[in-house]
Amino acid sequence: MTITYKDEQGIAGMRVAGKLASEVLDYLTPFVKPGVTTNALDKLAHDYITQVQGGIPAPLNYTGGGDIPYPKSICTSVNHQVCHGIPNDKPLKKGDTMNIDVTVIKDGWHGDTSRMFGVGELSIAAKRLSALTYDAMWIGIAQVKPGAHLGDIGAAIQKFSENNGFSVVREFCGHGIGRIFHEEPQVLHYGKPGTLEELKVGMTFTIEPMINLGKKEIKDGPEKDGWTIVTKDHSLSAQWEHTILVTPTGYEVLTLSAGSPPPPAFITS
Ligand code: MF3
Ligand code: CO
Ligand code: CO
């Protein structure tokens, strides 16, 4: 498999899919409260994507090269769950943190985005981890322009995260995206400036750092469901994700909508 470069028609399709994915997160936001189950959020998302947006939830039955199809329409990773948490019937409780990851297919194109949510009031440590992981994602995004390298993105995210005392998960990364959910290249969230693939106009890929409050090591969750990943030391983990297009002048974030949090001040200024 090779990197695909999107033409104007592909970019138009990616813009639509990206906005829809982000709008699913907007739609879910008011429902994230103590007592709601992640299964209820999954059903809300599934029905919204299929019935309101006329789209397909990409995770449902996705195998990603493994042998266990993903059984739900969104990923909900709570507290020390790093990624790919499967929605279930356990009610969320005050103080939980949760990443909701949504991928919508529309007219064959994929949009992939995730945000952190707080259930009720969060601890200072949880707020800080979530906020700085958001900044880490944007610091990665800010590296994107033709002629830069994938290693610039990873290096910037790693440096910022480790300078704040956090660790970067190594085993999962961002990815090229288009007509295929996960395509080349891999977008590591650690590395060395100037290394790896050169960025070129028309590339579309995700940046989705998973940042741990404790150590970087991960393991399969106790659920043994073939998907859920947790931190080995049980520390909190956070993740944010956007789908990005490389443009002649830099980047365009494809997964924005009315409810997207604003970029950090260091981006807009
Ligand atoms: N959306 C995830 C990503 O950012 C992948 C989820 S695969 C699933 O790449 F099958 F778990 F949904
Ligand atoms: Co992704
Ligand atoms: Co995702």
Image: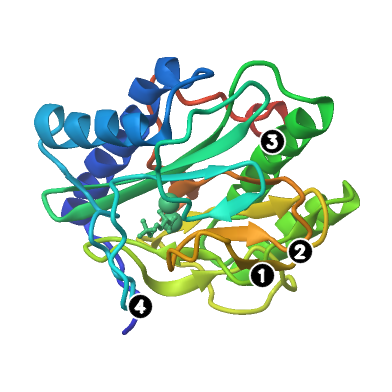
Q: Total marks drawn?
A: 4
| Label whose residue precedes the other's in the sequence (2 or 1) | 1
Evaluate whether residue 39 shows in this view.
Answer: yes
Quarter of the figure with the N terminus: bottom left
Q: Position of residue 52 (x, y in %)?
A: 13, 27
Mark number displayed over residue 130: 3
| Label whose residue precedes the other's in the sequence (2 or 4) | 4
Query: Image point 69% across, 36% down: which residue?
Result: 130
Q: Which corner quadrant of the figure contains ligand 1?
A: bottom left
When the figure is inspected, residue 267 is found, relative to residue 220, above or below; the finding is above
Label 2, residues with CA under 10 Å away: few <14, some 14-19, many ≥20: some
Q: CA distance from mark 3 to mark 2?
A: 16 Å
- Which residue has dot 2 on it? 216
Dot 2: element: loop
| Label whose residue precedes the other's in the sequence (3 or 1) | 3
- Which residue has dot 1 on it? 170
Evaluate whether residue 247 shows in this view.
Answer: no
Q: Nearer the viewer, residue 14 or 170?
A: 170
Q: CA distance from mark 2 to mark 4?
A: 23 Å
